[in-house]
Amino acid sequence: MSRSAHPAGPRYADVLPEGHYAAPPADLNALDPKVWSRTVARDEHGVVTLGGIPVTRLAEEFGTPAYFLDETDFRARCRAWRDAFGTDADVFYAGKAFLSRAVVRWLHEEGLNLDVCSAGELATALAAGMPAERIALHGNNKSTEEITRAVEAGVGRIVLDSFQEIVRVAHIAERLGKRQRVQIRITVGVEAHTHEFIATAHEDQKFGLALAGGQAAEGVRRALKLDGLELVGIHSHIGSQIFDTSGFEVAAHRVVGLLAQIRDEHGVELPEIDLGGGLGIAYTSDDDPREPQEIATALREIVTRECAAAGLAVPRISVEPGRAIVGPTAFTLYEVGTVKELPGLRTYVSVDGGMSDNIRTALYDAEYSVALVSRTSAAAPMLSRVVGKHCESGDIVVRDAFLPADLAPGDLLAVPATGAYCRSMASNYNHALRPPVVAVADGAARVIVRRETEEDLLRLDVG
Ligand SMILES: *Cc1c(COP(=O)(O)O)cnc(C)c1O
């Protein structure tokens, strides 16, 4: 799918036949557990609750728009990944999906490691007490300052992304009198089955050193010669929102092939491989994500088989799920402001947020579900487009959805599965105030990232 599949202002007839919502769902009030977090339900009045708290109360107390994160679900997902991979593997949560100090503490407590890709993410991780040896630093253009801070802090690994960086990290480590554990990120030529804008392992892209043509092997050659570096493994990340393990199968085959080549050429067996993240989640009822256990079993089998064929000891495996952990654990709560019917086309439902709190629909044509959550309705389904309040016609939150025809200003809508890449990509477009993130656990709600204020905006504007 590409952006051109949805030219500006598609007509009712253009989108209906291929859209996910070609037919309205049987029951508009039903909440598909695939797309809603674990502790979401409807109470006896028809109001949706999170951890037992009605969304009407959450809206009153915390305002809208706001992200509500199910801490119980987040921790359960961490444990599911941890248990699936066991003690001879490592699970690194990809902090770029959503990071805050509370999240770092949960990860720490649940035994996960953490990927960061900037000084800001590193600072958040360290401020919340994540042990440095459990942090990995990523990025295709880490600054000298970022590398220095990571080496000084003693991060467990830096993932090297270019020839320049191999030398840069080695020099910084040597200057600090350290030997930095590193992996080299390679591109294995696998194109993940996903939207082209978010696929990252085919050759023509900015990340990593290409296996084809020998750049990856050359990177290994250079890294092994430098005293400041301890090369411990090879890293591969093939894309995002992937549902099929066949891409990982090809990637593992090629990574293990490189390990065998390194053994033959240098006489060393690198002890680690990282197969990256990118595991898909359900944004709509049509998505069927794999369970962590299924993924762990498949990856382990693949790596074991490939290593046996190459005569290598099985290295320590790590994976880096971001979206698959935090994505399904949160929903965004909005209040409906206007309802505008365009006869013969659709109804535009405007909410009090938009592309500033969820850019993914505009950026990737991402699909989301949406539900009326402040009450139930027996009204007929109405083909709707949920849009934001920004000065941009591409400011769409949910492109095609059926909502009850009696929808009115003041109703609350929730968009599920917004835990990943929504708050972390949020902007101040139109000087919007970025919404808070409220964590709910054991019947209690607390702000973990507060709402921005006009003072926050004005503080940066030095006049
Ligand atoms: C973004 C990223 C991830 C996480 O991707 P998800 O789709 O959130 O699982 C993991 N590893 C690397 C190197 C990444 O860049």
Image (cartoon, rainbow, N blue to C red):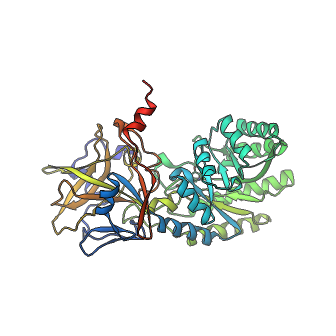
Residue 66: percent from left, percent from top: 36, 53
Residue 452: percent from left, percent from top: 40, 43
Which residue is located at x 58 percent, y 43 percent? 120
Q: Is residue 258 left or right of residue 458?
A: right
Q: Is residue 62 above or below residue 431?
A: below
Count how many numbered circles sit on residues in the image. 0
Which residue is farthest left?
Answer: 343
| Quarter holding residue 175 | top right
Q: Nearer the viewer, residue 280 or 101?
A: 101
Which residue is located at x 30 percent, y 38 percent? 392
Residue 128 visible, this angle: yes
Which residue is farthest top?
Answer: 463
Where is the C terminus found, in terms of image quarters? top left
Which residue is located at x 22 percent, y 68 percent? 376
Which residue is located at x 25 percent, y 50 percent? 14
Residue 176: percent from left, percent from top: 80, 39
Residue 19 visible, this angle: no
Which residue is farthest right?
Answer: 267
Residue 416: percent from left, percent from top: 37, 60
Q: Is residue 275 left or right of residue 16?
A: right
Which residue is farthest bottom?
Answer: 44
Q: Nearer the viewer, residue 320 or 295?
A: 320
Q: Nearer the viewer, residue 48 or 85?
A: 48
